[in-house]
Image (spheres, coloured by chain):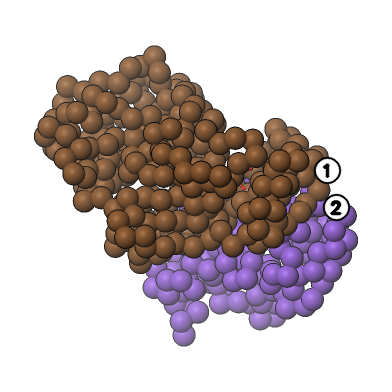
Chain colours: A purple, B brown
Amino acid sequence: MTKVNITLNGKAVSADVPDNTLLVSFIRDTMALTGTHVGCDTSQCGACIVHLDGESVKSCTMLAVSAEGAEVTTIEGIGSAESLHPMQQAFHENHGLQCGYCTPGMVMSAIELVGKNPNPSDKDIREGLEGNICRCTGYHNIVKSVQAGAQMMGD
Amino acid sequence: MYQTNYVKAASTEDAVGHLAKGGQLLAGGMTLIPTMKQRLASPETVVDLAGCGLAGIEDAGDSIRIGAMTRHVDVAESALVQNAIPALAALAGGIGDRQVRNRGTIGGSVANNDPSACYPAAVLGLGGTVHTSTRDIAADDFFTGMFETALDEDEMITAVSFPKVAKAAYVKFPNPASRYAMVGVFVAAGDGHVRVAVTGASSDGVFRHDGMESALSANFDAAALDGASVDVDDMIGDIHAAPDYRAHLVVEMTKRAVAAC
Ligand SMILES: Cc1cc2nc3c(=O)[nH]c(=O)nc-3n(C[C@H](O)[C@H](O)[C@H](O)COP(=O)(O)OP(=O)(O)OC[C@H]3O[C@@H](n4cnc5c(N)ncnc54)[C@H](O)[C@@H]3O)c2cc1C
Ligand code: FES
Ligand code: FES
């Protein structure tokens, strides 16, 4: 067991967890924030993407202890049901989801993408979302959503 | 995932100490963690290298030295690498996806010597040097077979150096799901000699192709490869590509790399 201390969505949290605890399990099971999903066991689908010190990472492919001292932001930390983050709003308005399973990861990935590249082209978005797999939408509306989200984040 | 003990090494010496006692090094975890999740690896101790100060890119005159813990994203976005060896920056920027590049490191990739990984092609194609905790190993001596390297059990990579060459390019045919190379070819041309390193194709891991190197050294033009062939018996066959298709891709990706130089 190791005590893990991180800042989760702006709040300092700590917990004793077995060393083999994945960051995603720490978030979902220890901290009961279930917006971050698990969609595969091969580190390919991106449903588990969170921000670690502002950068997008796959929380299923990292030990919680490796995040010691870091700032972690999950989908719960970017907006609320009353006041969605512009990227969430854009997914909502552009029908960027069907079942919604991939959506938290898509949104977290897209926010970092737009942070680095405020005016992404269609190609930039498709390449930038290489690490996110969606089995429902066919991606078209996701690309549209990210474009709209980028615009709204810029305003 | 099996139980494991986590330690964070404070220095290279500290890490090597744990390694000698049977610890497993953890760099970006992009290979090790999935392997542990699938219970294909069950290290008793995992030794995190994040605190060893091994990240960073230096201009060493006629070469570039990249610390073992330097992430793919940092190589891809480095102005130094983009100017001196643009093919290397492009290769790093084409590994996996953004999240893999935000964590994965050059040391982990080179040490792992996955037969489909991109970096081994650059190390071998550019004729780089792998710096370890005890010695310097030339690329030609480093990769010894699929997932095999010249590293001793208690030896770790500290940095990798790449000579600046006149012309170089890496072209890969990516697996559409993982982005690993189904076939990837790194071509480098410097002082009269051309090196061609192929990844993704052979069951022995990354290799150089003498025939195409001689043909290109005589005439650096994709047309010089018109008659080139690759031994089908050495090629990997899997659900993504049969051996004869991979053999075809090796020549084709080499032609494209030459054209891109
Ligand atoms: C979805 C996905 C897609 C990918 N696509 C590609 C791709 O297109 N091309 C590509 O090349 N790679 C790809 N990768 C692999 C990726 O580049 C990994 O980052 C890399 O292979 C391993 O690096 P790491 O830093 O994550 O190492 P880790 O996973 O931490 O370690 C890998 C191995 O190396 C050992 N090790 C680590 N550091 C050292 C060191 N300094 N000295 C000695 N041994 C060490 C570890 O003990 C372990 O055995 C992909 C991975 C994923 C999950
Ligand atoms: S659950 Fe993390 S990549 Fe699929
Ligand atoms: S909306 Fe169902 S997986 Fe993307």
Under 8 Å from ligand 1: the CB of mark 1? no
Q: Tell which residue pokes out farthest to the bottom in this image.
A: A155
Q: Which sits in the foreground, A73 or B67? A: B67
**Mark 1 sits on what residue?**
B3
Q: Is residue B17 above or below residue B195?
A: below
Give B73 or B137, whichever is nearer the viewer: B137
Above or below — where is B254 with respect to A120? above
- Residue B6 screen position, x and y as percent: 77, 52
| Residue A145 in view | no
Percent from the top left, x then y, of residue A25?
A: 78, 55
Does residue A32 appear to the left or right of B175 in the view shown? Answer: right
SS category of the residue bearing label 1: loop
Measuring from the top left, give residue A47's x and y in whole percent.
63, 54
Residue B252 shows which numbered tag? none
Quarter of the image with the N terminus of chain B is top right
Q: Residue at x 73, y 78 (%)?
A: A10
Asked which quadrant contains residue A65, the reply is bottom right
> Circle 2 sits in a helix, a strand or a loop, which is it?
loop
Chain at numbered mark 2: A
Q: Is residue B216 left or right of residue A14?
A: left
In the rendered structure, the residue with mark 1 lies on which chain?
Answer: B
Q: Residue at x 49, y 79 (%)?
A: A152
Q: Amino acid at mark 2?
A: Pro
